[in-house]
Amino acid sequence: MRNMKNKVIVILGPTASGKTGLGIQLAKHLNGEIISGDSMQVYRGMDVGTAKPSMAEREGIPHYLIDILDISEKFSVASFCTFATEAVEDICSRGKTPIIVGGTGMYIETLVSGKLYETETADEGKRLEYQRFAEENGALALHARLAELDPVSAEKIHPNNVKRVIRAIEIAVTGGDTKSDLEKNLKANKPFESLMLYLTPPDRETMYSRINKRVDIMMDMGLLDEVIRLDKAGLRNTPTASQAIGYKEFFPYIDGEASLTECVEKLKQHTRNYAKRQTTYFGHMEGLTPVCALENSGESAKRICEQWLKTL
């Protein structure tokens, strides 16, 4: 009997690895529609800096979770899971294939695994206390506290990822169960069946070269004008949008504290660092099917389609 659980394709990979192109090719082959898995493309007006696909680049393929919020609005993993689940159900109800494309690993991992235990109602006072502890005693000391409470999660989470360490501690302290216990219980209750594709990054030199070139293209496309416009609209004081790479790097230039060249180089550096963090995160995820990032997206799509059709 055919399994009736919703099936989705997920395309993960570090920035500038070719996710958008592969997603479009797959959507064409599989009568698919695309759900953005990027935490910042949800914001209207944040176009160039988030590498949001233009209408021309979308080639008529419907896209979800793009341009749905003003920059003043908060967005979180819980918000993403709510919007994305609704989109998956809508797409599947019309006999089409949902294709989730993005690089925000925690958001997508939480969605497809059903691990939405990272509560929005956590004690903000305790969270600040953990943050201060890390600042005063170091990330390793905070990680040691997690190791006492939940050694399995501590093994998986890098000490420098303070946010994830804090979330795991919160779960262990406030929920009774540890993060690792919750993961075991939720594995059997995944909301979707998914084919998880990982665009494996090329060698570091090639990846960094692609990132640097991408930033140069963004500058040619008017990134600075976009940043200035959004800064006037209050970007610096927003709860979530202000965290986006590609914008805050130019505030020193706007304030007359750095040259444009210095800010562009800082953006390239931050983007390279982000790609490295993404690669590390994806390296700890389970069930990923590797796809060469430098391979022609059309050829990759044909091979993936064959694999996908076998699961239906």
Image: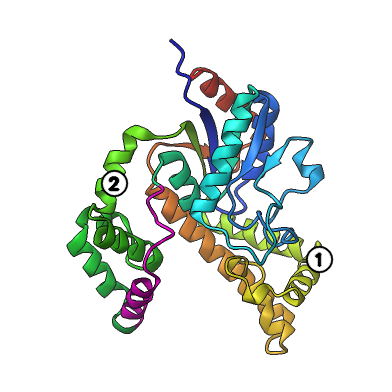
Q: Quadrant of residue 225?
A: bottom right
SS at mark 1? Answer: loop
Instruction: Judge from the rendering whether residue 249 lies leftward or rightward of residue 223; answer left or right.
Output: left
Residue 158 percent across, percent down from the top left: 33, 62
Q: Quadrant of residue 97?
A: top right
Residue shown at 33% from the left, 39% from the top: 186
- Secondary structure mostly seen in magenta is helix
Instruction: Judge from the rendering whether residue 115 lies leftward or rightward of residue 308; answer left or right.
Output: left
Residue that numbered label 2 is attached to:
182
Residue shown at 77% from the left, 75% from the top: 228
Say which amino acid is labelled 1. Gly
Question: What's the coloring here?
Answer: rainbow
Could you tell me if residue 284 is visible in this image?
Answer: yes
Residue 212 percent across, percent down from the top left: 65, 63
Residue shown at 58% from the left, 38% from the top: 86
Residue 135 percent across, percent down from the top left: 36, 81
Numbered range of the magenta stretch: 116-135
